[in-house]
Amino acid sequence: MAENNQQKQTITGVFKTQEQVEQVVRRLLDRGIDRDHLSVMGKNFQSETRISGFISKRDVIFGGLRSGAIFGSLFGSILSLFTGVGVLFIPFIGTVVAAGPITSILLGAATGAIAGSAGAGLASFLTTLGMPEDKAAVYQTRLQAGEYLVMVEVPTDKSGEYSLLMESAGGEEVHVLNQPLSRPCAGRCNSPEDLSPEIRAHLSDEAQQTFIETYNKVFDDIHDEAKAEQEAWNTIHQKYGEDEKGVWSKVKVEA
């Protein structure tokens, strides 16, 4: 538990093959990294079942296979180790599979940066996390080409050690962000002030209350932050639409 209270950084690297991704993820898990601090993104994860029958391009941004259990049964590989698996359509890249804490950020607060009127895509989203523009552009290009991104949150005093581990496992363009990925709340959300600034900025006052109520209901039942956040975003997407600024504020009228 002590490690969770330490200052963390996020290390990101590009991997050319799914086999390399599986190898580095298992090495990180073997070194004691919690799976809730691991994220992956890629276009070409090999499926044991044809995915085309389960999801269409029309609903791929916020619909589809967000359940780790369902996704594990489909892909039966490294993705079954993750919570918060999702499928998204990102401009300039296409349909992307994401797993780990990055999924909730992609599905929620960063939507405007990814799919806004400018169509800035993944590079714009990565810069909102603090990544230099040139590095973000490289990641977008290589993900578009069918390669994979792996992100791991580690204690700051061990970032050099884990950067070398990523490189030794085949990671390229390894970069260190001076912060962990954002979470909505540290445990239970007691008020809108408990929400991370990134999430609060993309929800109206009413939507913030909806998010908190759903998050707390799930968290109180199972004490799983990732699943609580995932269900909270599901509820937001069901009840609200985005305005021109990417804020979830338009209450949907039920038929």
Image (spheres, grey):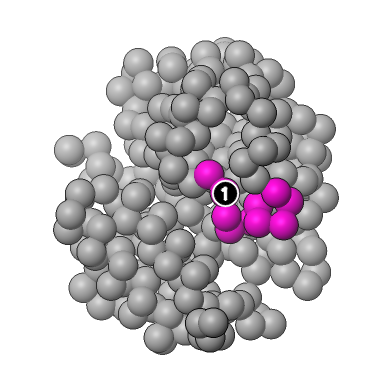
Of residues 2 and 202, the one nearer the viewer is 202
> In what quadrant of the picture does the C terminus appear?
bottom right
User: Quick check: 97 above or below 179?
Assistant: above
Is residue 250 in the magenta section? no
Measuring from the top left, give residue 32's x and y in whole percent: 30, 23
Graded by Cα atoms within 10 Å as few (under 14), some (14 to 19) or many (20 or more), the crowding at tag 1 reads some
Measuring from the top left, give residue 252's x and y in whole percent: 54, 82
Measuring from the top left, give residue 64's x and y in whole percent: 57, 49
Of residues 229 and 47, the one nearer the viewer is 47
Is residue 57 in the magenta section? yes
| Amino acid at dot 1 | Gly
- Quadrant of the rendered image containing residue 147: top right
User: Quick check: 66 above or below 109?
Assistant: above
Residue 222, visible in the rendered structure = yes
Of residues 32 and 214, the one nearer the viewer is 214
Secondary structure under badge 1?
loop
Measuring from the top left, give residue 128's x and y in whole percent: 60, 60
Write the start and end of the magenta stretch as one range: 56-65
Q: Residue furthest front?
A: 255
Residue at 23% over, 56% down: 219
User: Quick check: 34 above or below 66?
Assistant: above
User: Quick check: 117 above or below 30?
Assistant: below
Residue 10 placement, left or right of 120:
left
Residue at 18% over, 38% down: 2
Residue hosting label 1: 64
User: Mainly helix, strand or loop, the magenta region?
Assistant: loop
Residue 65 placement, left or right of 50:
left
Residue 4 placement, left or right of 168:
left
Residue at 17% over, 38% down: 1
Residue at 72% over, 69% down: 116
For the image shown, how many numbered marks are present on the structure? 1
Residue 162, visible in the rendered structure = no
